[in-house]
Amino acid sequence: MKKPLSLFLTLIALTVASHAAVPSLIVNNARGEKSFSLATSESAADLLVDANDSKTVLLATRLFADDIQRVTGQKASIKHDLNPASPLCVIVGTIDNSRFIKQMIASGKIDVSEVQGKWESTLIQVIENPIEGVEKALVIAGSDRRGTAYGLMEISKQMGVSPWYYFGDVPVKKHDAISIKPGPTVLKSPSVKYRGIFINDEMWGLRPWAHHTLAPEEGKGIGPTTHRKIFELMLRLKANILWPAMHLHTIPFNSYPENKVVADEYGIVMGSSHIEPMLRNNMPEAEWDEEYPNEPWDYVKNKAHIYDYWEKRVKENGM
């Protein structure tokens, strides 16, 4: 069964229309003295990221390393410490959480005034001698975890990895070398704060594909294996909110404890559709009937249990 591409087409319009401006050209394979050599036919620059930064940043760094290999065949090493320092490296991090980014701000090596305090914004710049032991670095400094991840994913897209490489089978564009413009380049905050989709009528495409092809071990629902693929696509398209699938007989999102963990790792905010108050799946024989069998779904007659039912889910997903 082919990947259910049609379920995600809405993401294209949402993400293209929602950003303040089309990002500037960052990848420039015409090498120059001030450009940064991200990869050649023989090697790739190391990726330096604070191990205590957001899980979303660490995950996006791993995706970026994979993308460099997809494009050039060279695998970038991920480092969390400067010992030993790499003469050329990519320094990735959020302004508030990365000790490397904080050090460059304190020393005046980078000016983050255009992104600091902003929503999902990023500074991308090549810096000479950014920190001790590093001769030259490509710096990706995000205002927050998604801003940092979006900076990495924008470079991935420009160097040849389509966000649709998996769901749309879009071929990766191969290059012998990748060079980055010196910058500074600022990816501005999106004009629409929350951007995403509602997975509707999943039983016609997404659920059968997940159940019979991708993750049969996770049953007739959409578990963490499938959500990882969905969330990666969303991260690459700079989408940040999902209303989960909830149709009749679909195992609810929160029935898989790892689902919300995976969502948070990818920086995805979980919402709920018009018939799912407080992230609860209330289709027949779903969560309400399981927890309160034979009780009326009526706030006038059964206020205490309905209130507790909603409150429990808010506490679970708010952790």
Image: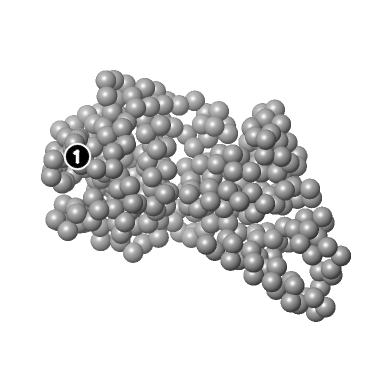
Mark 1 packing: few (<14 Cα in 10 Å), some, or many (20+)? few
Kindly tell me whether residue 195 is visible in this rendering. Answer: no
Q: Could you tell whether 8 is left or right of 156 in the image?
A: right
Residue 25, how many percent across, how many down?
Answer: 33, 40
Position of residue 297 relative to residue 190, above or below, is below
In depth, the one of 115 and 46 nearer the eye is 46
Position of residue 11 relative to residue 5, above or below, is below
| Residue shown at the point (59%, 39%) measured from the top left | 225
Residue 174, how many percent across, how many down?
Answer: 39, 23
Query: Which residue is disc 1 drawn over?
Result: 83
Q: Could you tell whether 188 is left or right of 241 in the image?
A: left
The N terminus is located in which quarter?
A: top right
| Residue shown at the point (19%, 53%) measured from the top left | 104
Residue 6, how many percent across, how many down?
Answer: 65, 38
Q: Quadrant of residue 106?
A: bottom left
In depth, the one of 200 and 57 nearer the eye is 57
Amino acid type at circle 1 is: Asn
Image label count: 1
Q: Could you tell whether 290 is left or right of 92 in the image?
A: right
Position of residue 178 relative to residue 226, above or below, is above
Residue 272, how many percent across, how many down?
Answer: 65, 59
Kindly tell me whether residue 143 is visible in this rendering. Answer: yes
In depth, the one of 319 and 243 nearer the eye is 319
Q: Tag 1, which secondary structure? A: loop
In depth, the one of 129 and 309 nearer the eye is 309
| Residue shown at the point (69%, 60%) measured from the top left | 280
Q: In which quarter of the image is residue 298?
A: bottom right
| Residue shown at the point (86%, 65%) measured from the top left | 294
Pick out the residue farthest to the bottom.
Answer: 300
